[in-house]
Image (cartoon, rainbow, N blue to C red):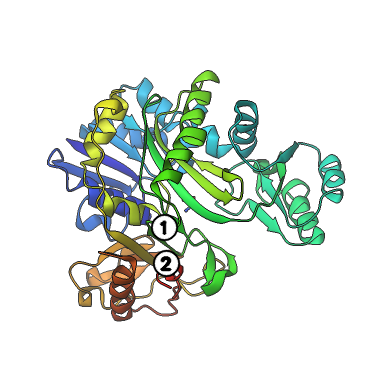
Amino acid sequence: MHILIIGGGGREHTLAWKIAQSPKVTGLYVAPGNAGTVQIAQNLDIPPTDIEALAKACQDMGIDLTIVGPEAPLAAGIVDHFTASGLPIFGPTRAAARIESSKVFAKQLMQKHGIPCPNGAIFTNYRQARGYLEAQSTPIVVKADGLAAGKGVTVAMSKEEARQALSAIMETKVFGAAGNSVIIEECIAGREVSLLAFTDGNTVIPMVPACDYKRAFDSDQGTNTGGMGSYSPPGFFDAALTKQVIKTILKPTVKAMAKEGAPYKGVLYAGLMLAADGPKVLEFNARFGDPETQVILPRLKSDLVDIILDIIDNRLHETPVEWNDDACMGVVMASGGYPGDYKTGFAIQGLDKVDPEIMIFHAGTKQGENSQICTDGGRVLTVTACGKNMAEAREKVYQNITHIYFKDCHYRKDIAAREVK
Ligand code: GLY
């Protein structure tokens, strides 16, 4: 099979790494990819949202299967377009991807179908939203409806912070039309965990749980990022909790989507808060998580291509999905200044100095002159390792990461630390 992966981050390098292990694969392409994917696949210089150009490349090159990494092409309807053109593709349709591209859609779905989530109210009018906000206590959560590159959610500790977030979304329109509606919801305390699942619209098979770290610096200081590291499994999330989430959240959501006329196929990502009265959905994503994928796929024993083909053919109930018992953790090396302004083009040294078992998943990297790999984005690499327990995986990552260097690099030193205390 010739397979195309759309995207160019750490998630897509990890997908390419896993897909390349399938005996079914004879040709692997990534659009646009990065300096890591080019070592195991052919990069195509096509942006993820140029759906026409991607479809034409698939037709011209005889691609048998396309796998979509990021949310933007899903929200733009790439699955609908490819399917109408007879091109096999893995991911939810545009209507189904609203579970991520519209937080209002997701909230209404959960409220209507009794799927546990924080209490919240939806507004399209700034004055009404502001009036409601004044009557609430803090902390309080303010969410823009649409896609906002991970920046659309503010957990406000004070009323003033919440007012500013609301005004930025609805008055200043910092996220454009994504801020035409907002959700103001209660802030619930607990531990956060990501549980992703494969689904063909009927069968739901969970992946192993994972945790990610959104803040830029140790001890959850600094601003939110795309994710600075992740690990799997979290010791506090046991098999019984997974069962509970399948029963109360994942299966009811897939059923609800079908009832709403938007059958869901692909990866369903539930961002959960383990509240005192049970797990609740903070957000849904319509795709693999980043950087969760970097620590989930190394634990998948089964062939990912088989799973994906069975989902497309509505045969997931026949598919064995097996996981290993390893602990896996990954630390993101980021450009100085990220998630704010940062410079790129710095040579990355020492990639050849790390132990062979260390997995280095590239994100913002490109090959410069003389094949030198250089920085080309905010998040640059996820340095990942597995071990028989989390202490071993951490030791491997933090020992090897010291061999890698690029100017102004920063990374968190506390990824998965709470698991080994
Ligand atoms: N790790 C969060 C996300 O993928 O959206």
Residue 105 is tagged as none
Tag of residue 419: 2
Element marked by disc 1: loop
Q: Quadrant for the C terminus, please.
A: bottom left
- Camera-nearest residue between 78 and 103: 103
At x 72% / y 49%, what residue is drawn? Answer: 169
Distance of label 1 from label 2 (alpha carbons)? 7 Å
Q: CB of mark 1 within 8 Å of CB of mark 2?
A: yes
- Residue at 24% x, 43% y is 322
Query: How many C-alpha atoms fall within 10 Å of the one at disc 1: few (<14), some, or many (≥20)?
Result: many
* Labelled disc at residue 234: 1
Q: Position of residue 16 (x, y in %)?
A: 26, 49
Relative to 243, say whether 390 is above or below.
Answer: below
Q: Amino acid at mark 1?
A: Pro
Q: Is residue 154 visible?
A: yes
Location of residue 50 by image quarter: top left
- Decide which of tag 1 and tag 2 comes sooner along the chain: 1
